[in-house]
Image (tube, rainbow, N blue to C red):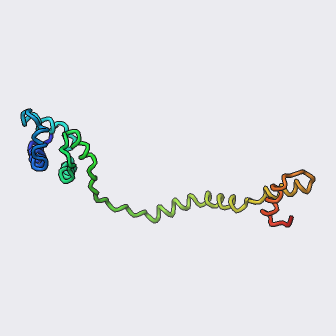
Amino acid sequence: MSLPAEVIDRLFSRLNAVYGAAWDRQMGNAPLADGKSAWGHELSGFADKLGMLAWTLENLPERCPNVIEFKLLARRAPVPETSRLPEPKADPARVAAELAKLAPAVESARKAVHGVDHKAWAKRLIDRHEAGDRLNPTTLRFAREALRMPA
């Protein structure tokens, strides 16, 4: 489906007014109806997005664009912001029910995190050292620092 004739007429009128002789040279000796038909076909994807074409007409480049360049410019037009519906409010009873389902998992995770000895590695290294294992001095120093023990 091609653009309506009124839209193409408006485009050609505006481009002719802006670019004058450059527009005439670009159109050449081809019949005007053929040029309008080609532009209508190339820009048919904008039939429901005429605002993008209007934006392009307001932001024309210095040099006279051909139909492909005009189409690329139109694709760069900003998309108008549409208003959104407000988000629905959460049902407090359903939220409470879902949180109640999660309570056992949250509690077990809390116990797992709080029941972990994060310095067990340092204690194991000190025990190995005291048992006679030879450890790298830096490793031993880090273990003591983690447990805040004197050297």
Q: Position of residue 75 (x, y in %)?
A: 26, 46
The image quadrant of residue 42 is top left
Residue at 91% x, 57% y is: 130
Q: Position of residue 91 (x, y in %)?
A: 43, 63
| Vertical order, 104 against 13 (above or below) | below
Instruction: In this rendered view, identify the residue nearer to me: 84 or 71.
Output: 71
Image quarter hosting the N terminus: top left
Residue at 90% x, 51% y is: 133
Q: Position of residue 94 (x, y in %)?
A: 47, 61
Instruction: In this rendered view, identify the residue nearer to me: 10 or 87.
Output: 10
Task: Judge from the rendering whether residue 31 lies leftward or rightward of residue 145; answer left or right.
Answer: left
Image quarter hosting the C terminus: bottom right
Total labels: the figure holds 0
The image quadrant of residue 84 is bottom left
Task: Judge from the rendering whether residue 88 lies leftward or rightward of residue 120; answer left or right.
Answer: left
Instruction: In this rendered view, identify the residue nearer to me: 69 or 130.
Output: 69
Residue at 17% x, 36% y is: 41
- Which residue occupies the extreme right position in the image? 132
Task: Judge from the rendering whether residue 122 lies leftward or rightward of residue 65; answer left or right.
Answer: right
Q: Position of residue 85 (x, y in %)?
A: 31, 60
